Image: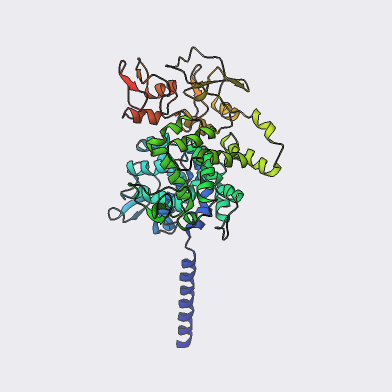
Amino acid sequence: MIFFKKTALAIILALTLCSVRVAAQQRYSTKEYIERYKSIAIDHMNQYGIPASITMAQGILESDSGNSELAKSSNNHFGIKCKKNWTGKKVYHDDDEPNECFRAYDSVESSYRDHAEYLDQQPRYDSLFSYASNDYKSWARGLKAAGYATNPKYAELLVKIIEDNKLYLLDQSNGAERYTQAQAQSKPQGNLTRQEYIELYKYIAIDHMDRYGIPASITLAQGILESNSGNSRLAKESNNHFGIKCHRNWKGGKVYFDDDAKDECFRAYDSVEESFQDHADFLDQQPRYDKLFTYASDDYKSWAKGLKAAGYATNPQYAEVLIKLIEDNKLYLLDRNNGLHLYASHIKAESGIESSFESESNVNHHTTYPGKIDPNNFKVAEQVINGYSLYTNNQTPYIVVKDGYTLQHIAQTFGLSEKTLRKYNELKTSGEIQLIEGEMIYVARKQNEWLGNARRHKVREGETLRSVSQDYGIRLAKLAKINKMNKTQSLQAGTEIKLQK
């Protein structure tokens, strides 16, 4: 009898240990977590405008990639507490205080859905939806500012998770495919060819063109030139692909190389993607490059000459070298609408496609009007595309709404997503919008300031900061920043609004 008891105990112990091992083996890695839930995050981005990268990063951080006690016991992957209006299931866990009430769900999918609706319906998060769905940094800072979490480093943690795992790729068109492609590409052991370099980083270049207005062709040409297609010692040892030196305000990693002078300080990065990001931020934030952003994002020649004039490099032939790289490799195709398709077609065909490029819907010649635009006094259209008369204001193309126009059809005609079109015009990111006959709808990103002669605008009765931004073709956020105002702040008739920095 004792023998059987011992045997039974041994079996029970073995089964228990086996269960423990199985439980331990069921821990998700961050990569597995992303693969499991990225499609939901992308779906919610399309429905609500929340960046897929933000959803994934919050899920990873709040649930420890699905491994936290709260996530496993109640499917709560976003740390959302009960609040007064919650009528669903509840669980209790220690958090900022002992025994706090958290929401419980029947499935992880229900937790993801509640997270999207929670952000969409809570007024304190309204300002987040004014940011683009690929502007994950603004979303991260906005979540922290709105009080989503008490951790003072919450925004920085989200951004680090996004950049370490390349989750920003999910925010782009065909994001799932781009993310999968990036995961499949292992770091090359030998030297990259120029074509391999372009294929590796063209998506980032196009994303930065959409976000900052820097031509994708310029970003890639600078990367090719400054890093020798990723093969230079500086690129390989410190991921610095743009030759950016430390300067006084740099607090990141540093390496030292001989350049114009001996033993100069260069910035070092944890990844190539971080170098590309810093390059975009560097051009966007340095005042000496401000003039570049008055050029169109397909005007690579002006950008190349402007970079040289602003002192990006000491080589007197810098602009010419960039232009030659762009034209030899047809990188200018990436600056156009549907650029990835055009460039891919060129690579496949190698010839014979260029004759059709001129039929693409691009506005190549812009004019700057000398004063305030009167929407009821239109100039002669510069171009007519599929029935839409295209005009230019502040070097930005726009159409004038007529009866029957819809955002969806306008976006399709000009090769944009409806979400991008809404972003260009600072319209709400979701829900139906009834266009008003006579209003201006921009089909490209507006400028950072007014490029004409007028420096100020006197507010008329009924005007808002957004209506002024539309009249002058200035981005609303930039106009608000110039005037140190909130984007929704009311305007008083007779006051003056600055149009330039």
For the question of whether residue 118 can be seen, the reply is no
Using the rendered view, name the quadrant where residue 330 is placed.
top right
* Residue at 63% across, 30% down: 360
Total marks in image: 0
* Residue at 48% across, 45% down: 52
Q: Position of residue 320 (x, y in %)?
A: 54, 38
Q: In this picture, is 56 found above or below 328?
A: below
Quadrant assignment for the C terminus: top left
Left or right placement of residue 2 versus residue 410 in this view: left
Q: Position of residue 16 (x, y in %)?
A: 46, 73
Q: In this picture, is 127 found above or below 229?
A: above
Q: Position of residue 462 (x, y in %)?
A: 36, 17
Observer-nearest of 232 and 262:
262
Q: Position of residue 486 (x, y in %)?
A: 33, 30
Observer-nearest of 469 and 69:
469
Residue farthest to the left, as pictured: 97
Colour pattern: rainbow
Q: In this picture, is 189 found above or below 15?
A: above
For the question of whether residue 314 can be seen, the reply is yes
Q: In this picture, is 119 found above or below 374?
A: below
